Image: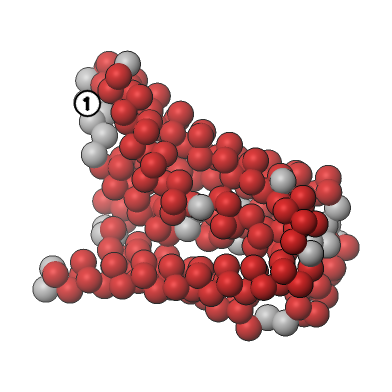
Amino acid sequence: MAQVVRAIILIVTALFPIVNPLGSAPLFLVMTSEGTPAERRTLAWKVSVNSFFLLLGSILIGTHILSFFGISLPIVQVGGGLVVISAGWGMLKREDDEDRKQIQRTAGTGLLLRKAFYPLTLPLTVGPGSIAIAITLGANVRHTGGEKLLLGLLAAVVGALVISLCVLVCYTFAERIGKLLGPTAMSVVMRLSAFLLTCIGLQIVWNGLTALIHTL
């Protein structure tokens, strides 16, 4: 049991700073600002469920999927980092009025809930950095043997569940945080978060490129 606890702590401590639900909550609130509170709670639930299965799948079968398609982990970092850069850069360039109009169009037609996976789950919540770390953690988990398989599966499930619950709590209470900060402060936080998201994407790309260069 001690091995399971250590594995859970390793998964949570490795993934939580990268997923960063506290830092993503302002972006979630801005991107869903014209939705109703009920829609926002539903979205928070959907994003947390999507995050759970995405992280769990990356831990358990991520290496097998990459091997099947012949894709290396650095390539995932480079490609995923470019997606994160695109998302962050798009939010940086977008004007506040344009944000409101776009969200009103999607919310008015009920399409807001369709954003639960993209972009709210991927890449906003679980980005390529989180997926790369989850795959790396999964590669270090021993799946051979009945008992070790069950212990590894239990640690992966609990670790991914803890992260997804943190996402659910932070996103559910994001509206209260927004009310405390006010629209101007939220706009500033959103811009700063978008800038950091772009920088994170650049760092992920650089990590992938560095690994690829070392293979030459």
State the image quarter where residue 92 is shown.
Answer: bottom right
Q: Residue at x 35, y 62 (%)?
A: 76
Q: Quadrant of the N terminus?
A: top left
Residue 78 or residue 66, whichever sits in front: 78
Q: Is residue 98 left or right of 213 when viewed as pictured? A: right
Q: Which residue is drawn at 26% across and 42% down?
A: 139
Q: In this view, does 137 lie above or below 81?
A: above
Q: Which residue is drawn at 51% across and 34% down?
A: 162
State the image quarter where residue 71 is shown.
Answer: bottom left
Question: For the residue labelled by badge 1, is the local secondary structure a helix, a strand or a loop?
Answer: loop
Q: In this view, does 73 lie above or below 96?
A: above
x, y percent for residue 171: 67, 48
Q: Can residue 28 be seen in this view?
A: yes
Q: Can residue 111 be seen in this view?
A: no
x, y percent for residue 72: 26, 59
Going by the numbered disc 1, the residue's amino acid type is: Thr
Q: Is residue 129 left or right of 161 when viewed as pictured? A: left
Q: Quadrant of the C terminus?
A: bottom left
Residue identified by numbered label 1: 144
x, y percent for residue 12: 41, 39
Q: In this view, does 36 lie above or below 96?
A: above
